[in-house]
Image: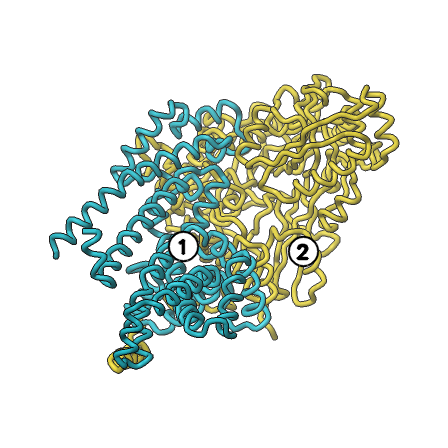
Chain colours: A cyan, B yellow
Amino acid sequence: MHLRTGWFLLRRLLSVLPGLLGVTLVIFLLTRVLPADPAVLVAGDQASKADLARARAELGLDRGLPEQYLHYMVRLLHGDLGMSLSTGHPVAQDLAQRLPATLELTLAALALAVAAAVPMGVLAAVRRNTVWDHVSRVVSIAGVSLPVFWTGLLLILVFYYALGWFPPPMGRISSLVGGPERITGFYTLDSLLARDGERLLLSLHALALPALALALVAMAPLARITRAAMVEALAADCVRAARAAGLPRRTVLWAVAFRNGLIPVLTTAGMVFSFLLGGNVLVEKVFAWPGVGSYAAEALVVNDFAPVQGFVLAMAILYAVLNLAIDLLYGVIDPRAQTVHG
Amino acid sequence: MRRAAMFGLILVAALLGPGAGAQAAVLDRSEVLVVGAENDITTIDIHFGANRPAYGASWNLHARLLTFGTKKLPNGTLSYNYEDIQPELAESFTVSPDKHTITFVLRKGITFHNGDPITAEDVKWSFDRAVSLGGFPTVQMAAGSMTKPDQFEVVDAHTFRVRFPHVNRLSLPDLAVPVPAIYNSTLAKKHATAQDPWAKEWLKTNDAGAGPFLLEKWTPGEEIVYRAFNSYVGGAPKIKRVVFRIIPSAATRRALLERGDLDIAFELPPKDVAELAHNPKLKVESAPIENIAYYVAMNTRMAPFDNKKLRQAVCYAVPYENIVKEVVYGRGLPLNTPIASNTFGHDAKLSPYKYDLDRARQLLAEAGYPNGLDVEMTITNARSLDEQIAVWTQAELKKIGVNVKIKKIPDGAFVKAMVDKTMAFQVNNFGGWLNDPAYFFFWNFHGGHNANWNTGNYVNPALDGLIEKARFEPDRAKYLALTKDMQKVVLEDAPWCIIFQPTLDAVMQPNVKGFTYWFHRQIDFRPLSKEKAS
């Protein structure tokens, strides 16, 4: 079993590489095709033509595209993602510093979404066409139609501005307190590890509203897919057999039907996670959350290409790793999946 | 289930117990000034790759030989005083009889943030750096006729001399702008390399200043924390810490201000400022920005705008009053001439232009376009104000048959188009650091110099002659006469339709005292204090 899983892992990892290579090529070309000049960022708006030419040469932009791509790939293989012109730091350093903020937010949003949407979907499937089903439908439609920055601003208006129940949307934690000592970069985890109750509560409190804004978007597909998967699972033969065997309703629902309905839910969770990773730029902006989304968006606006390339690559890698994890989880949930994929 | 509950209880008990770790003490809100800003700085080194917020960082982290004094504006807001040069690191200076040399005597016993003494060597290294790096700092130093390292001389450890090739009234004020910041050369040289002799890499993120504040922490994209430098030459600042927090969303900044979680925010949209001015729980300080103009420019050397009558026609069609009222919400003064209301030589009576569509139609016909024409206007995506100005202008021009197509492009591309002068019609603005009209004309209308800011692509040798005379005219009355002549020429040829002079607005809690308007449009933390509620 270990050897088979090992091979499986290796083959999956290798199959991901051509995709990643394609990503680097596409993002490299896209940033070069834009009608903008990163030299302006370096040379400033008082630059003369000579200053601009000098800046372009410094950035290596005066060489041919294939040569620039080659240099980029060579540096990439050494782990060098280039320098950010807007922060002055290496992109790899910036990403490492900011990625935990985005991951923490996204994972919290996903957890909230799953915790709310899955029971809601199960309930909707079990009590079809009752008020619970309709509530689930309305919440899903609202979540997916309302733009996330609007929901974010609305949450700030109601829960911070009007009611004062949540901390000021100024980032991950109050500047006056400061974050916990960095171990993983996740404020909640690091506070836990440092046994710092105050910082744990403060970071959870600050995480609540932005995670909720994102979760509302994620709930829609999760709730609907759970409902559909459960409806199908409940109609299966094994469920009828379990009921006939006299198993209690709760066991039939969770131990038999739910386990079978879980695979599509897991796939959806994976898709939602990768969508959230990219889509949290606006939430980061509204809540002043210092994540990689706003980092890349701000860099793009000032024609600072290296962070944009780094960000897209990081997201592509995360997505590939996530899919791999989900594939492995299939094997755990459904033993039949292992033989199919082995 | 039970096991999970047990684990949870143990966890909670462990957390509530002692051992919160050796963490930094929580700061006291009453001693910290929290500033909300839209954009982060790109560097703390104003000599290379600095964006506008970076000017503010450099201003507070560094000291210079000279600075400006303060005055009070009619509306009660404090402002720097361009006419009042004050000593900072230099305790005194003497001008030679022929006015070609200025000798500075440095104060004794002054140090940088790390304790190193400040000497004339540091001043020379910093000045040499500014003129040698090229780009923005070199251009700025040149405005004061400082262009070569051999103009700067270390006479002794406490005496520094600058030799000027000619007399320039801008030389002294140019020594008090952010660019001639004094860096700790001993510290910087330790981090210089053969490829990087001026320590550009290291000084981007490391503090080598002697200014009123030290850099305590800079987390890019999140915040900059400044701590007061108690040995600052001008006295220890009253605020002990400033947290400069990056909050990109203007709506969020406004909500934070109104709830009291931000002490001060500026660069809020004019609509928000206009509304907040009526909020009794907040205070708005404003000052009209000096030596600035917001305008639409026409490329005088590109068809169809190489036609003077067409340009003049456009200048009768711009809805000046409506823009000030509806776009800027009154957070600006109407302006119809290139010299702003608080700049020497301002004369509002010289301009004939006002919103008059009949006159515009008449001139359009005289220009040879009785049936109108199609033109393209370019705007940057960096300023939403520009887009609104473009739309208002487009609506009015349509009424006289001129169909304007608005093209919005990324700021990087816009600046490149300014350098290449490829735009026919654009919205833009320029504000000069030094409050001097000849300086404004030199950057915006001098054909020989033809800077990027000569957005009208205007070349008029006669005007160039006037500008050159004005730049070095020592007699005040003659200078005034020249400013009138320069305004008349530019108004007649109309490369620009000048619309308004924006105000700098800062919204703050009522207990924040000492806010002062500076020409660099960033916050000077030195005079700020938070009055304790009694």
Vertical side of B499 occupied by B422: above or below: above
In the rendered image, residue B338, in percent from the top left (x then y), is placed at 73, 33
In the rendered image, residue A168, in percent from the top left (x then y), is placed at 51, 65
Which of B525/B283 is in front? B283
Q: Which residue is mark 1?
A: B217
Q: In the rendered image, is residue B347 in sight?
A: yes
Residue A238 occupies which quadrant of the picture? bottom left
From the viewer's perspective, tell me whether residue A157 is left or right of residue B26: right
Residue B464 occupies which quadrant of the picture? top right
In the rendered image, residue A265, in percent from the top left (x then y), is placed at 36, 61
Crowding near the residue tagged with mark 1, few <14, some 14–19, many ≥20 C-alpha atoms within 10 Å: some
Give me the disc on residue B273: 2
In the rendered image, residue A79, in percent from the top left (x then y), is placed at 27, 41
Q: What residue do we see at 23% from left, 47% from top?
A: A12
Query: Type of residue at label 2?
Result: Val
Vertical side of B376 occupied by A3: above or below: below
